[in-house]
Amino acid sequence: MIRGWWYRIMSATGAAAVAGLAVVLANQPSVQALVTTYVPLLWRLEPTVLSGAALQVATATSIVIIVGTLLPLFKPRPWRILDVVGFTQKRVVVAGLAIASLGYFNYSFRLPRTTLAVVIGLLLVVMPLWFLSIRTRTPSDTERAVVVGDDLPQIERIVSESDLPVVGYLCPPTAYEIHSAPASSDSDRAVPVPDGGQHIAGLSRLGGLSKLETTLIEADIDTVCLAFRTADRSEFFGTLDLCHKHGVDAKVHREYADDVLTASEDVELLAEVDVEPWDPQDYVFKRLFDVAFSGFGLLVLAPLVGVIAIAIKLDSPGPVFYTQDRTAAFGETFSVYKFRSMVTDAEAKTGAKISEEDAGAVDPRVTRVGRILRKTHMDEIPQLWSIFVGDMSVVGPRPERPEIDSDIQTNGIDWSQRWFIKPGLTGVAQINGATGHEPDQKLRYDITYIRNQSFTYDIMIVVRQLWMVFTDAVAVFLGKDPEAPQTDD
């Protein structure tokens, strides 16, 4: 099986060749006459054959568009057969729409409609076959796996219970607790090694986590099994990032799968970790929607932002905005902005460890303007900027403070599953009233979103959230006190 950069080169070159041959074949007079005569959907199309410079430019343009659309497939990844077929066909359809758009705008060397229809039909069959052929394992290929982590009992369990041909393991070079064998054993099964790591008898230790990328390349690794217990975010997500970068399958023992994102129907001994839960095509639509939504909101609400800023300054001394660090995707942090709704340095003045967002509307530290901002959700408006620059998304798990993330994780709740995607302004938890004070319930809603996320799902959540904001604002305008959840986390 072709790997690494050779796979990228071969897959891209082959895709370009398949696309070019499809255009040349579809441009043949006999093929055009055949499809316009016997294919019902193409009966009304006129046979159109290109030649000379028109054919050359149209072919080159089609190849560029098709290859560009298929870019994610040029990276070696452990996809299932049906995933490869489905994703390839989706990309071919997108490429067809892009080529058709050139014809709509009267591009000089556009591909005729009959030729385009035949090309797309051919590519829907041939292109998936091409990617499947270069992904197929040959009899001479041998699967190779490594275990990465700091939990020695878990490493031993994976090696002993699975059928994976494990070539060794990588353990962080830190003096972790030694895992000892039963008292009846003659010696410890795990002993320290000079660099501070651990060694398991009978299994090769390949080094620390810094050697993971080298190991993946030099040892031609197919699968990485995660066996972490006390790893920090950089170790855990750094490992997943390398797996994604090199197209290596990441797995975890099913009894330890609660700390990662896996397929809900995965019942194998080793569950596959979903290191990229978003379909790349849906991700593009999501990002475009984020930019359009936040940009439009910032433009339309600009006058209101000025009014709110003046009201905050007149109501109480202090800054207009409230800033706090929050946890982003893959455990990183970013600064989130809100309109200040409490007195300045509220925590320091009262000694209470309650942040601006945790205080209720009746808290004496909440200002008069702040109460209105909270009830109408207008204190969230500055977060549109975080969405516009890409720190947040419109829909996603609400970001928590890093210290609260750590506290929740310490209490046994597998909060890190939320870190697999970008945090959002709203989400399933928010439209169902779950707050940061109910981490178990909130986590269930967030995981539901992560597993079912799509662009259309986002639109449904946004519409419902906007309706909730509208009804709360109307209630405040009518002098009623809305029972809607306050800013929750």
Image: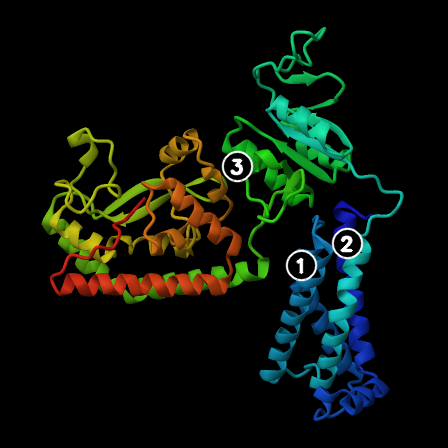
**Of the two numbered discs 1 and 3 in the rendering, the one whose residue sits closer to the viewer:** 3
Q: Is residue 297 left or right of residue 115?
A: left
Q: Position of residue 62 (x, y in %)?
A: 71, 73
Between residues 349 and 86, which one lies in front from this camera angle? 86
Residue type at mark 2: give it.
Answer: Ile
Does 218 sit above or below residue 396? above
- The amino acid at mark 1 is Leu
Q: Quadrant of residue 32?
A: bottom right
For the C terminus, give its image quadrant.
top left
- Which tag, 2 or 3, sits closer to the chain's start? 2
- Label 1: which residue? 71
How far apart are the alpha carbons under marks 1 and 3? 31 Å
Name the kind of residue labelled 3 in the image.
Asp
Mark 2 lies on residue = 9
Q: State the CA–CA distance, disc 2 to disc 1.
A: 11 Å
Q: Nearer the viewer, residue 278 or 269?
A: 269
Label 3: how many residues lie within 10 Å, few (<14), some (14-19) or many (20+)?
Answer: some
